[in-house]
Amino acid sequence: MERDDVLEYLLEARETLDNIEKDLLHFEKSTLDGSLVDRDLLDTLFRHFHTIKGSSGFFGLTAIVKMAHAAENLLDYLRKNPEDQDEDTLELLITALDYLNELVEHEESSPSGGDFFSEEQIQFLTKLNNKNESIRVLHLQNPEKLPSAQTNDEFGLFGDDITNENPKEEFGLFTNAKEPTVVKEFGLFVDDSTPKPNKEFGLFQKPDFDLTKEKNPKPEENLKNEKKTIIKKDIRIDTDKLDSLLDIVGEIVITEPMVTDHQDISKLKLENFQKTALQLKKLIRNLQEITLSLRMVPIAGIFSRMERLVRDTAKKTGKQVKLIISGEDTEIDKSIIEEMYDPLVHIIRNAIDHGLETPEERKEAGKQPEGTILLTATQSGKEVWIEVRDDGKGLSRERILNKVISLGLIAHTDAETLEDKEVWEFLFHPGFSTAKEVTDLSGRGVGLDVVRKNVTTLKGFVDVFSVFGQGTTFLIRVPLTLAIIEGLVVRKADTYFILPSIDVKESIYISKEPINELYKNNHSIQHRTNQISLVDINLLFGKDSDLNDQRILKEKYVIVTESHEKQMGIVFDEIVGSQSIVIKPISPIFKNINGLAGCTILGNGHAGLILDVRKLISQHLSSVTI
């Protein structure tokens, strides 16, 4: 068997296991609250495990086969005895799923011939087989519990007589009744006391009742056929090929203005050429959008994984938690989704461990015993907003400030003047935690620190809102994609810069305006009713500001940028225009320059430096001391 074939199957197996986890969690919610067992869901789970078992056997993955077969036997028992479903049985199925994921992951990274690689897996398989054996022995001792008649009601496929104790008729396939029972058992064949040749097989009968039965399933069958058609349109493409395609399209985007706006033809009046160039620009724009959409995937994949996290964390903390998900159809770049998993894990764990109260505490506070976590995703312009909101006790300003003061992060006299937003920012400080003891869930102060670092790497923001006694909200804002951005192209002397449009608040043309100098390299200008801090881009390269020797700003452009509600104006000589920018990695020569996000090639053939506005603002504010 070729290794590539095995890897391709393991990828499919992972998708099946993901579906099993989703269905198991749904099954748990629909049964443990006292509702009736969803037989269709049980059948679906049984088919999933059966598929894993059969396909893995074809590839010689014996450990996966044994684990899936044991889980399949347990599910087969639940199909016949749904009333015996309990929390322990469900826990066995979920644990079996965990071990199947372990086996698949191990086979992908370090093939072991399909055998078990840990003693815990063998011990659990023994436990699961013992459970199945005890069930079999129990029914041998109590044959009256075998639900032969019940099977007929539940599946509607097998007809059997309650008094029939013949083992050969256990599955309801062979009956010895005096009257033919084919009509009753399958509901497909209708016979008369006076049979006619054209009605011998009951295929041409048209009673009203049968017509009704035949009419009802048709919409569902049509829907299934439509779904199958859609599935057939999907193909697997290596992400490396998509990246190569995106790179080529990026080069086309760069080359197009170099051709259509070339200086050799810019002064010529070529009307037909301009019309054709405009059409080419539209086509390239469409090609760019389609190419970017190929990497866009629904965020539902990562949201669904949070359901298991909430379940396990709630069990560890002894709390009752309900997760409500909305906006899971929102699409975002695949590379961003992969980096969003860890931040969401830390935020949701904190929400359950620190935010939500125990059932007893919630009752005392007049709340429902079950806490709620709302996980939503929405698209806002070129950003995706991911919100995690809980209805817990909220953040304690006093408790946070006491910890901050004890760590020496701020003086006691300055603590009272801080706004709530400034207090919440300390939550992201490395090593900061208000937990009284270290557990496997929290207490080390690394959770929210990871959140801020990961989101910042994605050029995103994290904001915190909280009302004491009512709950806390974490809002993550990340761009739709990192490959191509909309940027404002500006010029300072002979150097071109690009500012991401998302960070630009407004642009101002200054014909003549006095400059306020606080001290060297620190200036401001009056704009409307506000003082805007001015920054010369020379500071980025370790030079002194050109504004030091000036008292009046003449014929300059000030680009007002904003980050975390902090504004800063950057002075340039010219605004070239707005265009799509393909981000290229920056040379190692510039690795020590804090404030550059990358580079690109502009339509005029010049290189442009992409500014990291957020780092510039943060760096400037940290250097300002009045």
Image: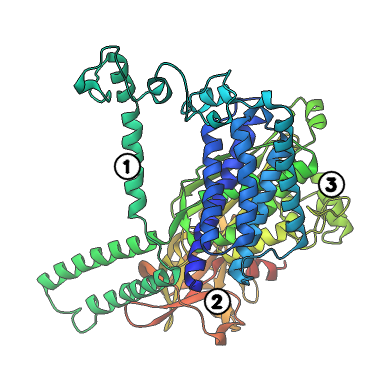
Residue to which mark 3 is pinned: 399
- Residue plotted at (12% across, 75% down): 269
Residue placed most toward the observer, 106 or 143? 143
Amino acid, disc 2: Leu
Residue 489: image location, x then y, percent: 40, 71
- State if disc 3 and disc 1 touch (CB < 8 Å): no
Q: CA distance from mark 1 to mark 3?
A: 57 Å
Q: Is any part of residue 354 visible from this angle?
A: no
Residue placed most toward the observer, 577 or 191? 191
The 10 Å Cα crowd at callout 1, few under 14, some 14 to 19, many 20 or more, is: few
Query: In terms of secondary structure, where does tag 3 sit?
Result: helix
- State if disc 1 and disc 2 touch (CB < 8 Å): no
Q: CA distance from mark 2 to mark 1?
A: 67 Å
- Residue plotted at (50% across, 54% down): 528
Residue at the far top: name it: 193
Residue to which mark 2 is pinned: 547
Number of the label disc, if any, that sits on residue 226: 1
Q: CA distance from mark 3 to mark 2?
A: 45 Å
- Residue plotted at (65% across, 48% down): 70
Query: In terms of secondary structure, where does tag 1 sit?
Result: helix
Residue 536: image location, x then y, percent: 54, 75
The 10 Å Cα crowd at callout 3, few under 14, some 14 to 19, many 20 or more, is: few
Amino acid, disc 1: Glu
